[in-house]
């Protein structure tokens, strides 16, 4: 594979990963107040320079416990396990994913411009 095409493919893979991260982060933020919700994390398995697959794992840390004996999700002691999502952390993750997406997009656009320049030279 030629280096320009390889750069474009790698940038596309990076954009796909960051898009998935943004999606998971938005799910986490929207469920931050849902009792019992566990934060989702994206795990990327790499094989050399290529991404083999993406998988989603749940964050195993426990959320806060709130004493609400009338709540339908209360345990035998009257406590409800709240979400383990920290909105500040999620916003920082979303900002990082957004910037990584933009970096991959810029890389893709640069490679496309180089490819177009090469085609213009070959047309002469």
Image: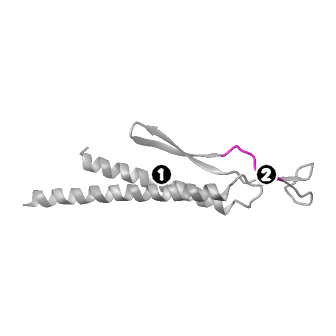
Q: Quadrant of the C terminus?
A: bottom left
Residue 36: give x, y in percent of width and height: 76, 53
- How packed mark 1 is, by other alpha carbons closer than 10 Å (few <14, some 14-19, many 20 or more), is many
Per the rendered image, the range of residues in magenta is 59-65
Judged by depth in the image, the label closer to the viewer, 2 or 1, is 2
Q: Is residue 74 left or right of residue 94?
A: right
Could you say whether the residue bearing mark 2 is in a helix, strand or loop? loop
The overriding secondary structure of the stretch rendered in magenta is: loop
Identify the residue at horizontal 49%, vertical 43% (top origin). 53
Q: Which residue is mark 1?
A: 17
Determine the image quadrant of residue 31: bottom right
Residue 3: give x, y in percent of width and height: 25, 46
- How packed mark 2 is, by other alpha carbons closer than 10 Å (few <14, some 14-19, many 20 or more), is some
Q: Is residue 117 left or right of residue 66?
A: left
Mark sitting on residue 101: none
Nearest the camera: 64 or 55? 64
Determine the image quadrant of residue 88: bottom right
Q: Is residue 49 above or below residue 86?
A: above
Q: Which residue is mark 2?
A: 64
Counting residues from the start of the chain, the first of labels 2 and 1 encountered is: 1
Determine the image quadrant of residue 70: bottom right
Identify the residue at horizontal 69%, vertical 54% (top origin). 85
Identify the residue at horizontal 11%, vertical 58% (top origin). 121
How much space separates mark 2 and mark 1, taking CA atoms?
30 Å
């Amino acid at each position: 594979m030629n280096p320009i095409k390889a750069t474009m493919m790698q940038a596309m893979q990076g954009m796909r990963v960051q898009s998935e991260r943004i999606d998971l982060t938005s799910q986490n933020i929207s469920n931050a107040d849902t009792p019992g919700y566990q934060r989702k994390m994206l795990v990327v398995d790499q094989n050399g320079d290529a991404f083999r697959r993406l998988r989603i794992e749940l964050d195993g840390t426990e959320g806060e416990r709130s004493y609400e004996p009338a709540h339908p999700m209360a345990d035998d002691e009257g406590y409800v396990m709240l979400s383990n999502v920290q909105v500040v952390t999620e916003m920082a993750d979303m900002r990082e994913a957004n910037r990584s997406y933009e970096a991959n997009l810029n890389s893709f656009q640069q490679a496309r411009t180089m490819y177009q320049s090469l085609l213009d030279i070959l047309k002469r």
